[in-house]
Image: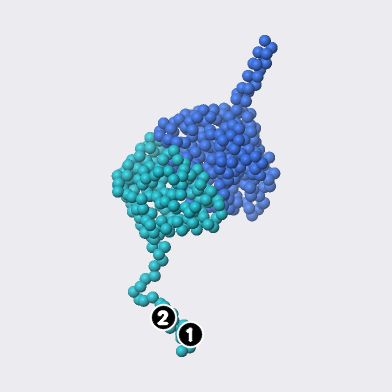
Chain colours: A blue, B cyan
């Protein structure tokens, strides 16, 4: 009898990580911008559906309005039924609640996804959009094909942007400790000078199937969140000088809240555990202040 | 005869005759390439104009239908298309030089970007759809900045050491050239 009790306790404990409810660590302030970040999702797998359920759960206490999709939105076939299985069904509760998804294209995505109404790309391979009410602008890039036209467009958009927060997202990470892919150095050479010049504060990317927060580079906060359905277990190179925090043992997603000059973030695993959290300060105009030091990320 | 007079005489002797033209051969090759690309785009536009317009915000059924119809129309209109119709021999030489030049100046990063998730020299055909099972290999910006500009309907993509000219909306291989990358 006693051994049975122990067995029952062990079974219960084993289930705890899978059944733990999400503890929101964000300020959750009225008027702030609340969003979620996912990438490499379009598998139609149970992992994708489980992360989708976690998003729904998180939204009950943290009512985010938008979701950033960082590419590889649909792997393999792109028939109408694939759009259903790999996007519409898993995120149906969010779509029904009016949450808007803004997609970037990854290297597994057909370029025609830009016309899909629920990805809000309005027929563009790369585009920009403003947060509903807050002083935040997003720049969404097509990182597998960074030609002169896109670079010129990006510089024009960054130059003309008057919003305090400039946030860029794309599929390929400029910095990464992934053993499978690693940093997209050739892309970084052409993009990072623009990010520095025009005060981009945060860059999100996917592609690597794990979560990684990079130590601030040139005052810019870089995040990789490519584990929202696919997972490359143990792929973050141990001892990488780039990693501030990495999580590569389970699927994950991010919640983000922007309130005035602060961006709070929380990375959450499929089991509902918080695997990273912290704060990023907005970069100020280069002429009036110095970039934030590494300590601005906690 | 003084030195300046001799110099002037030399210049007159070396000057081209009245009827001759100085043509930059690379510019001529590039123009030929642009003309071939433009002719493709004309054909494409004619086909697309026959299709129901795809709105900027469409349902998956409409997107799939439009892409299939565009692909089928292009395949019919270009049934005689052959490799090298656009990437002619002269253009292939020129493009190989441009790619080699871009890669030689930039360290290993662009070459690594091309190799990443590159499916290799898998069989492809002009006018065939690019396989959906294959990831689109990244084309490094350094190479794109060196290559001739393309209209928005077309993209360069590497597959193995081949360079493809891809119609990104029809998802169709318009032309390709082997050995675009030197080892």
Quadrant in which residue A232 is drawn: top right
In the rendered image, residue B71, in percent from the top left (x then y), is placed at 35, 42
Please identify the quadrant where the N terminus of chain A is shown: top right
The residue carrying pointer 1 sits among few (fewer than 14), some (14 to 19) or many (20 or more) residues within 10 Å by Cα, namely: few
The numbered mark, 1 or 2, whose residue comes first in the sequence reads: 1
Observer able to see residue A37: no
**Where does the image place residue A50, in percent across and percent down from the top left?**
54, 28
Task: Give coordinates of residue A282: x percent, y percent.
Answer: 63, 45
Is B155 left or right of A261, judged from the image as shown?
A: left
At 63% across and 22% down in the image, what residue appears?
A: A14
Q: Is A41 on the left-hand or right-hand side of B76?
A: right
In this rendered view, identify the residue nearer to me: A191 or A68: A191
Residue at the front extreme, as displayed: B183
- Let me know if residue A237 appears in the view: yes
Identify the residue position indicated by label 1 in the image.
Answer: B4
Neighbourhood count class around disc 2 (C-alpha, 10 Å): few under 14, some 14–19, many 20 upward: few
Q: Residue at x 59, y 38 (%)?
A: A235
Q: Do marks 1 and 2 both belong to one polypeptide chain?
A: yes
Circle 2 marks a residue in which chain?
B
In the shown orientation, is residue B119 left or right of residue B39? right
Residue picked out by circle 2: B12
Height in image: A81 above or below A186? above
Local SS, label 1: helix
């Amino acid at each position: 009898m006693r051994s049975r009790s122990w067995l029952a306790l062990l079974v219960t404990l084993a289930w705890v990580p899978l059944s733990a409810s999400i503890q929101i660590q964000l300020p959750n302030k009225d008027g702030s911008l609340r969003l979620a970040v996912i990438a490499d999702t379009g598998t139609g797998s149970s992992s994708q559906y489980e992360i989708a359920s976690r998003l729904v759960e998180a939204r009950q206490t943290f009512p985010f309005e938008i979701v950033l999709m960082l590419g590889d939105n649909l792997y393999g076939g792109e028939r109408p039924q694939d759009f259903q299985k790999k996007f519409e069904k898993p995120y149906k509760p969010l779509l029904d609640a009016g949450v808007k998804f803004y997609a970037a294209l990854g290297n597994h995505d057909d370029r025609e996804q830009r016309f899909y109404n629920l990805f809000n790309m309005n027929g563009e391979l790369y585009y920009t959009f403003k947060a509903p009410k807050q002083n935040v602008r997003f720049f969404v890039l097509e990182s597998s094909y960074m030609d002169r036209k896109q670079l010129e467009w990006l510089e024009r958009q960054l130059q003309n942007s008057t919003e305090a927060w400039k946030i860029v997202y794309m599929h390929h990470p400029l910095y990464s400790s992934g053993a499978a892919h690693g940093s997209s150095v050739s892309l970084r050479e052409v993009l990072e000078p623009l990010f520095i010049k025009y005060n981009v504060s945060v860059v999100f990317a996917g592609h690597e199937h794990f979560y990684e927060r990079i130590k601030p580079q040139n005052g810019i906060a870089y995040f990789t969140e490519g584990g929202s359905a696919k997972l490359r277990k143990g792929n973050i190179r141990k001892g990488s000088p780039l990693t501030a925090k990495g999580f590569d043992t389970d699927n994950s997603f991010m919640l983000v809240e922007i309130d005035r000059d602060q961006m709070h973030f929380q990375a959450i695993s499929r089991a509902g555990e918080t695997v990273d959290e912290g704060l990023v300060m907005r970069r100020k105009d280069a002429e009036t202040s110095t970039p934030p030091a590494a300590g601005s990320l906690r | 005869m003084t030195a300046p007079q001799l110099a002037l005489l030399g210049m007159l002797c070396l000057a081209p005759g009245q009827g001759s033209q100085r043509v930059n051969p690379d510019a001529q090759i590039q123009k030929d390439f642009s003309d071939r690309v433009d002719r493709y785009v004309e054909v494409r536009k004619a086909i697309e104009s026959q299709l129901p317009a795809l709105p900027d915000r469409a349902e998956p059924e409409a997107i799939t239908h439009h892409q299939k119809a565009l692909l089928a129309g292009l395949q019919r209109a270009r049934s005689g298309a052959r490799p090298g119709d656009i990437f002619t021999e002269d253009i292939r030489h020129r493009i190989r030089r441009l790619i080699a030049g871009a890669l030689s100046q930039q360290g290993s990063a662009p070459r690594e970007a091309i190799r990443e998730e590159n499916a290799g020299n898998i069989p492809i055909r002009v006018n065939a759809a690019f396989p959906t099972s294959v990831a689109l290999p990244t084309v490094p910006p350094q190479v794109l900045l060196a290559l001739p500009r393309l209209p928005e309907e077309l993209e360069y993509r590497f597959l193995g050491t081949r360079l493809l000219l891809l119609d990104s909306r029809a998802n169709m291989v318009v032309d390709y050239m082997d050995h675009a990358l030197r080892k």
